[in-house]
Image (spheres, grey):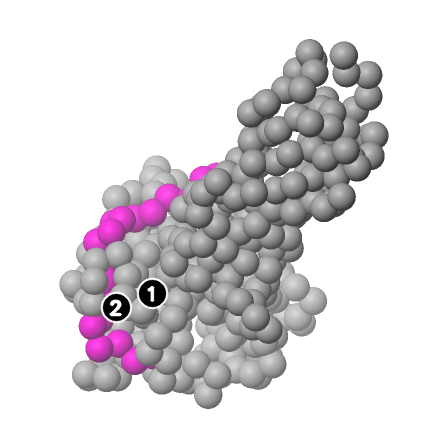
Amino acid sequence: MKNWIVATFIVLSTLLTCSAQILEHWTYDGVSDGPLSSAPSLSGTGNSFGSGASFLQVKSLAGLISPPSFDYLQGISDASYQGKTTGIVTISYDVDSVFFLNTTGSATFGFGLRSLASGTDDCNVFLLYQAKEYKFVVTDANGTQTSASISSGQFNLTDLSVKQVYNLDVKGTPGSFKVYYSIAGGADVEIFPETLTVHADFNLNEFTFAVPFTGTSWRPSNNSFSFDNLLLEAPSPVLEFVQQGVSYIQDNGILGGDTYEPGDILQIVTTNKNDSVVTATDVSTSLSANPSSFSITPLSTLNFSSVDPGEIYTATYRVEILDGAVNGSNTFTVVNQIGAGADAVAFPASF
């Protein structure tokens, strides 16, 4: 009978991630009250959406938009991304609060990308307030359309997060532009899924910020957008080890469960995920442990040409416990990897 533990499978650590390429980043914590032009991008570019517009302010640790008196559009072009035609680009920001006590009509503001490849091709998203109702107005290759209500029956909205994902690798196809929002930390909601489209000839020229005034009815007091954590980035794929499943192929003793002894043969299935908004290509996964204690043989493919955002992929292994196994807990390491050689990006995790 079994009288000692060879391996008890417990998750010991989680994945390591690789960093996205931050193109522009603003956060207004610690910035003195004043024009937004006094709060340049933290990414090191020194860019600002202020440009002296008096209605754009830093107030109470956030960017504040009070009622404008003209159509405002500020575009930023920077060598780090101007002319970009491939890859993924995302815009994200938080709306701390929107307050329209004295506005009975409508008001909008939003961010987007502009291409000058064929005139002016905008892909942008505006938050629209109209008669105590909040919606999104999206412009893409298909034109302009308005979403269903995301909040209604009130003049204020708080704790809204927005993400805009531009996939320039598949531009011209439905789903190449995606828009998500969440309220108060809730689940992400996608609007117009698999419909929005980046223009087929898109060539990133400007990161744009617009506050339209014509046709709106902002009032001069008690009306404002307050936003923070504005980020323009080129995200990297992130591969995650989710869980393992362990079962017997051959039990050399009489006890089952999670204790094993030399001679036992197990089957271990690792479950992994692309936990990002970017497709990962040239993906591989592996399982390893002390070679004097375990012999590991793959029973399934370990290589995947591409893994889509949110996609789950698994690998199956035959694991024999050898005579040299040490009594006690043992560590297995899963490595999910993108690429190979010196340029590979690895995401190790252990259980």
Q: Which residues are magenta?
A: 183-204
- Magenta run includes residue 212: no
The residue closer to the viewer here, 319 or 167, is: 319
Vertical placement of 136 versus 3: above or below? below
- Which residue is painted at 72% across and 22% down in the image? 259
How many angstroms separate mark 2 from mark 1 (CA)? 6 Å
Image location of residue 210, percent across then percent down: 36, 71
Q: Is residue 163 left or right of residue 30?
A: left
- Disc 2 vs disc 1: Cβ atoms closer than 8 Å? yes
Quadrant of the frame with the N terminus? top right
- Which residue is painted at 57% across and 50% down in the image? 286
- Residue 220 occupies quadrant: bottom left
Residue 171 shows which numbered tag? 2
Amino acid found under the numbered disc labelled 2: Lys
Helix, strand or loop under label 2: loop
Image location of residue 287, percent across then percent down: 60, 46
Q: Residues within 10 Å of mark 1 (few under 14, many from 20)?
A: many
Amino acid found under the numbered disc labelled 1: Asn
